Image (tube, rainbow, N blue to C red):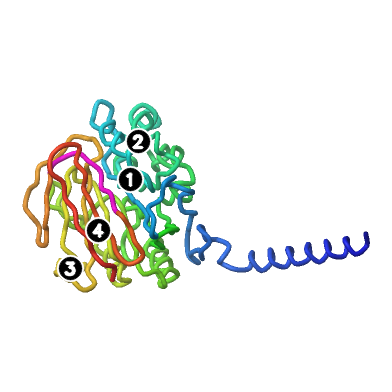
Amino acid sequence: MQASRRRLDVRLSALAAALVACLASIQCSGGNGGPGSPTGPTIPGPTNPNPNPTPGGFDTFVGAGDIAICGGNAEATARQLDGIGGTVFTLGDNAYSSGTRADFQNCYEPTWGRHKSRTRPSPGNHDYATAGAAPYFEYFGMNAGPAGLGYYSYDLDASGWHIISLNSNVGTDGGSPQAAWLRGDLSAAANRRCTLAYWHHPLYSSGPNSNNEFMREMYRILYNANVDVLLTGHDHLYERFAPQDADSRLDTVRGIREFVVGTGGVPLYDFQMVKPNSEVRIKAHGVMRLTLASDRFEWEFLPVSGAGDGGTQTCH
């Protein structure tokens, strides 16, 4: 009996020492078993987002932006998600027209809402039409990262990709807290081979909203860290760009490939002046599906109807 009690005391002492060490380390802040960011929020990756994961270390990553307006086409794109496993992302403007609680409950919840548990969102300007995007943070909870910030990161288990969701609605200049967090997060994830970022307002777009210059410094931070892919929304259309740097220069060695995927269900836009390095432009509702491997990615734009787009690329 005394020997058993001594063994129990040893175990408890070891657990206490481990807890103290953990609390003193930034490693405790991480999700998915990896290190957290020393400068900002890191959340756990989705828990078993795909009940039938692709063999061989692949993750499925699927979504769109500019999604749910009552009477729109969000139900058609939600049905596409019904047949695709993996993590769901959103590229902002989740609930129209003002991101109110009623917009989320009446328009988003009956459609894309059925995939909320596996969704990792980003906010758009329509979400911020209600003060502080409060209903957005309330609706998605911890899946949207710490309330009020709107930016966070996580890792995908099977492929090892590092994923960053940013907030293009607040503080995007090079000296902003979000930019400081992003630099720290990228530094902490420097050992990751492949990285993807997403937010609402595209730096480059041939749609009516055109380029969003206020996102240039955030793009530059990503480019300097060799990030591979950027997903955006805001213009209600699909557009693929060739890899380029933060100053519109084609760069097939380490440039970022940006996609505009504002095709989740709200009325579509027409293309305007075509921007440099624009490769493919499609006016259709649909979702973007990426298959992420440990050293490459495959993309597919899946329209509700009509021809789509696809390709593959190796990570930097």
- Under circle 1, the secondary element is strand
Distance between the Cα atoms at labels 3 and 2?
A: 35 Å
Residue that numbered label 2 is attached to:
112
Q: Is the magenta stretch mostly helix, strand or loop?
A: strand
Residue that numbered label 1 is attached to:
90
- Write down the region rendered in magenta: 283-290
Other-residue count near label 4 (Cα within 10 Å), few / some / many at <14 / 14–19 / ≥20: some
At x 16%, y 46%, the residue is 308
CB under 8 Å between callouts 1 and 3?
no
What is the number of the mark on residue 247?
3
Residue 125 horizontal side relative to residue 155, left or right: left
Q: Which is closer to the viewer, label 1 or label 3?
A: 1
User: Looking at numbered disc 1 in the image, what kind of residue is underneath it?
Assistant: Thr
Other-residue count near label 1 (Cα within 10 Å), few / some / many at <14 / 14–19 / ≥20: many
What is the number of the mark on residue 79?
none
Distance between the Cα atoms at labels 4 and 2?
A: 29 Å
Relative to 253, is 68 above or below?
above
* Front-lying residue, 248 or 32: 32
Other-residue count near label 2 (Cα within 10 Å), few / some / many at <14 / 14–19 / ≥20: many
Q: Where is residue 49 drawn, in percent x and y?
A: 43, 47
Farthest residue in the left direction?
273
Tell which circle, 3 or 2, labels the residue nearer the N-terminal end: 2
* Front-lying residue, 52 or 260: 52
- Under circle 2, the secondary element is helix
Tell which circle, 4 or 2, labels the residue nearer the N-terminal end: 2
Other-residue count near label 3 (Cα within 10 Å), few / some / many at <14 / 14–19 / ≥20: few
Residue that numbered label 4 is attached to:
214
Quadrant in which the C terminus appears: bottom left
Distance between the Cα atoms at labels 2 and 1?
A: 10 Å
Tell which circle, 3 or 4, labels the residue nearer the N-terminal end: 4
User: Looking at numbered disc 3 in the image, what kind of residue is underneath it?
Assistant: Asp
Tell which circle, 1 or 3, labels the residue nearer the N-terminal end: 1
